[in-house]
Image: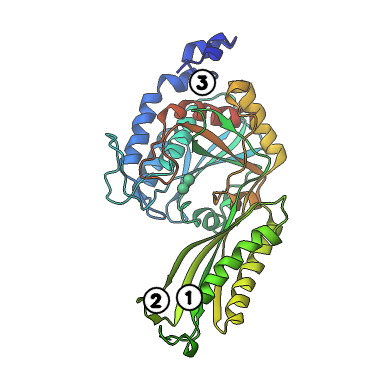
Amino acid sequence: MTSLRSVLSSRPDAAQNGATGVEPAIAADIARFVAIRRDFHRHPELAFKERRTAARIAELLGEWGYEVTQGLAETGVVGTLRRGNGFRALALRADIDALPIREATDKPYASEREGVMHACGHDGHTTILLAAAYHLARSDKINGTLHLIFQPAEEIGAGANRLISEGLFNRFPADAIFGLHNWPGVPTGHFGFIDGPAMASVDQAIVRITGKGGHGAAPHETVDPVVAAAHAITALQSIVSRNVDPLDTGVVTVGAIHGGSASNVIPEWVDLKITTRSFRPEVRRLLAQRVPAVIRAQAESLGASADVDYKLGFPSVINAQNETNFLRQVALDTFGEEQVLADFRPRTASEDFSFFLDVLPGSFFFVGNGDGAPLHSPAYDFNDAILAPAATFWVRIAERFLS
Ligand SMILES: [Zn+2]
Ligand SMILES: [Zn+2]
């Protein structure tokens, strides 16, 4: 779709392609990559089981002249391109796994695997990086080393950490790493950048509150874990409102409560499942300390006891300032101001790209997927119109970084 602004734009390539800044060679053969994306979509695979997907990625990268390394973190693939005598190295990452969701679209390319769906658009992220890979292999503007990382198991927060612990950056050292995510509700092919914390950390508390069961008619002979759980849940609401600095962000969500089986029986125990999220490490530590303390104190005040298993998930995505400024500048130079969102706010969802940013400078950015169902919805549909602009952006980023 051509906007009035891009028609009026003085950029010569804008008029040719109908989208400001898209590389003509990418626009010319995008149909091939739409077909690849839809093939991935029809054959989604869950975390660490992405064997078909990985084999296809490796096959294509090999055809295009990349050094291909397979079997990292089970199903990860790295494609390496070395050009010229430049000493800089850049890593670009795509995630490749799907979700245990039953697809509810009527698309001709809908999932053919019952109960498994690319509902987060990782089929799109993989294809965007492949389209860029094809064109980068033909670029004469690369002087240095490019590592394309196809990461498994993002959805369970395990793939990035596993790659790093297997020595990813010892084998494929890089000066910076970049990653992207499509975002429904943001205009198609528009780019969003965030300095500093961009996506939240997520941790989990698994709780059992134990009392003393008995007859519902004789509560004085019991210790009621249901009442203790109710007090604990209510008191948890005070952590964000009373303990977290009002200028910071924290989320405490009790997502599951299970206990008892009959209206006239006081049960022995009640289980809770809780997630906590934050942007700053200080807030993350505060939540990790206060959530168990509040639950235990509430339970004990009523004669019950609480067992809290607090599991650290993954840290927040914290973008480096220089690398984020670099991305924003490349986007402005490539697409113009109209496609770069001026004020893109951090998201309280999470991404295991955070583990990469713990060890390397880099930045994680967002590409608008247009209107439609949100991520992780059975009705979600990746927008193929973002393949060409996003692949163009990867190409320009690599050419500029490794020039
Ligand atoms: Zn997801
Ligand atoms: Zn995702």
In the picture, measured across the screen, residue 82 lies left or right of residue 195, that is left
Q: Residue at x 37, y 80 (%)?
A: 264
Label 2 amino acid?
Answer: Gly
Question: Is residue 322 found left or right of 368 in the rendered image?
Answer: right
Quarter holding the N terminus is: top left
Residue occupying the point 59% across, 25% down: 141
Label 2 close to label 1 by CB (< 8 Å): yes
**Which residue is disc 3 drawn over?**
23
- Point out the residue furthest to the bottom here: 221
Q: Amino acid at mark 3?
A: Glu
Residue at which label 1 appears: 226
The residue to which callout 2 is attached is 260
Task: Classify mark 1 as within 8 Å of ligand 1 or not, answering yes or no.
Answer: no
Percent x, y of residue 269: 46, 79
List x then y, in percent, for residue 9: 58, 11
Mark earlier in primary sequence (2, 1) = 1
Q: What mark, if any, has residue 281 been given in the picture?
A: none
Q: Are marks 3 and 2 in contact (CB under 8 Å)?
A: no
Which class describes the residues within 10 Å of circle 3: few (<14), some (14-19), or many (20+)?
Answer: many
Q: Is residue 9 shown above or below 296?
A: above
Mark 2 and mark 1: span between their CA atoms?
A: 8 Å
Q: Nearer the viewer, residue 306 or 386?
A: 306
Q: Quadrant of residue 111?
A: top left
Residue drawn at x 51%, y 30% is 390
Q: How many residues crowd mark 1 within 10 Å: few (<14), some (14–19), many (20+)? A: many
